[in-house]
Image: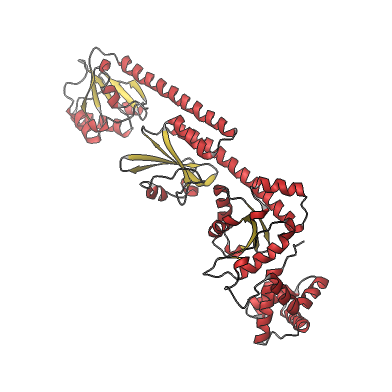
Amino acid sequence: MSLRINDLLRAPQLCTRLVSGGAGCDNVIGWAHVCELADPAKWLSARDLLMTIGIGIPLDYQAQFEYVQRLSDAGLAGIVIGENPHAPTELSGVFDSSERFGFPVLMTAYGVPFTAIAKAIAQEGQHRDFERRQRMARIYESARANLLGLALPQLLERLEQDVDASLWVVDSMTVEPWVKGLPSLPLSCQPSVARLPPRPHCGTDTVHKVRVVDDTFWVAGIPEHDDCILVCRTSSPCDYLVLQHIVAVLGLEISRLHVAHERRMKVGRELLEGLLRQELTASRLEEALEALAMRLDNAVLAVTRLEHASLALFHSTVRRQVVPVASVTIGEELLLLLNLDHACKIQTCLGSALGVSGIIHTPGRAAEALRESRLALAHTDGERPIVSYGLISGGSPWLPQSVESATRTYQQVLGKVCAYDEQQGRVLLHTLNVFLSNNRSWLKSAKLLHIHKQTLVYRIKKIEELTGRSLSDTEDVSVLWLALKASSMCGSEWPA
């Protein structure tokens, strides 16, 4: 705890009393120095306590007023005048200026040497340094314990005990607990913390002071992690150096969590790719499932479209809520392997429509589960943002209601086009999809496909020839569009 003017006044051995400027009695004293020059403000620093027998204090009222004003402007803690014959007998200018600027003026008894005051301040500084070193030692002992497996909530509890403070690690945007298991920020200070500038614009070393009724909270950013901040409440004034060491330890733990998350996502991606390609050995499958805390008898495949999904928010939520999930992208799709009871949480996080397959059960059913999830996705709408394959009925009755129905529709209408694509390099199905998605606009479709309009005309004629349907006929267009939807539902080939 820092030594203040009030602490000097309460020390009976110093025989020091306040004569004016009581508003500054809470000023912190960093050091004490004797100076008898006419302008001590030039030679002393902020928080220094000036000690003088009065030789340098001017006799004129206005000069005395400006003398104290300069000391106050320089940020000094106060002035101690020794009672002796050398000081001016009339100090009204000193007292008036002191009251005006809230700058404390103290008088010390003649028999008390200034060295006694300086030693008291030095001893307090030594005690403060000792306490700081002890706190830092405890902080890094907690950091060492964390390397042995202490989770972030438990680390935060230990740090609170180490520094005798209340600590919160919260989301920098929502001020909600940054990870599951952390305490919530008191409701009284949430609005004030939420109004602080965004991290990238306020500097990594900035510490904000937030006053809420009778409490003071200190808010600090965590380096390299703009999505979270540290909020601290102490019964005594904040020690910025100790606070920065806490931030450093928490930054290391959060970085460790990021690395662990990336490792889990890599394992999940390899697991999902291996399942879809049927390339996993039984031992590798068991090892990956154990690492992700998942079981195939409770796992499903889910799919969403990337243009609607916020991948950054998805990864952030998965990392912070520790939701077991494997993910991989296929074209514009995000494929997910997850426990069935986490599907709603993931859909809320993504904020996009999500199609969910039936339970996978066995590795050989992965490709079938992918087709089921795509079919379920086609039946989502504004009222049903998440649809499970087993609950498709009642959705969009004009769409296929099963994988078998979707496959049959696709093969009957577009089978010859698909076969042509396999022989010639896969361009007609994609061309048809772009053409219909853009309301049969020749110019826009050609531009999106990066081809000449005449090339597009040739491709459309080839599609009409293979399917026996005209893209100028409304009924044929409807059939082709539904067949395209069916192809996206039952498509199961993994891109090369």
In the displayed orientation, state which residue is furthest to the bottom: 473
Residue 201, position as x, y percentages in the image: 47, 49
Compared to residue 167, the image places residue 461 above or below, namely below
**Is 472 in front, or is 361?**
361
Compared to residue 44, the image places residue 345 above or below, namely below
Residue drawn where x is 75% and y is 47% of the image: 284
For the C terminus, the quadrant is bottom right
**Is 125 in front, or is 272?**
272
Left or right of residue 40, residue 319 in this image: right
Left or right of residue 132, residue 271 in this image: right
Left or right of residue 448, residue 236 in this image: left
Tell me how many marks there are: 0
Colour mapping = secondary structure
Residue 28, position as x, y percentages in the image: 33, 29
Residue 407 visible to the viewer: yes
**Is 375 in front, or is 97?**
375
Residue 376 sits in which quadrant?
Answer: bottom right
Residue 247 visible to the viewer: no
In the displayed orientation, state which residue is furthest to the right: 423
Residue drawn where x is 68% and y is 48% of the image: 289
Compared to residue 45, the image places residue 470 above or below, namely below
Compared to residue 221, the image places residue 408 above or below, namely below
Residue 78, position as x, y percentages in the image: 29, 27
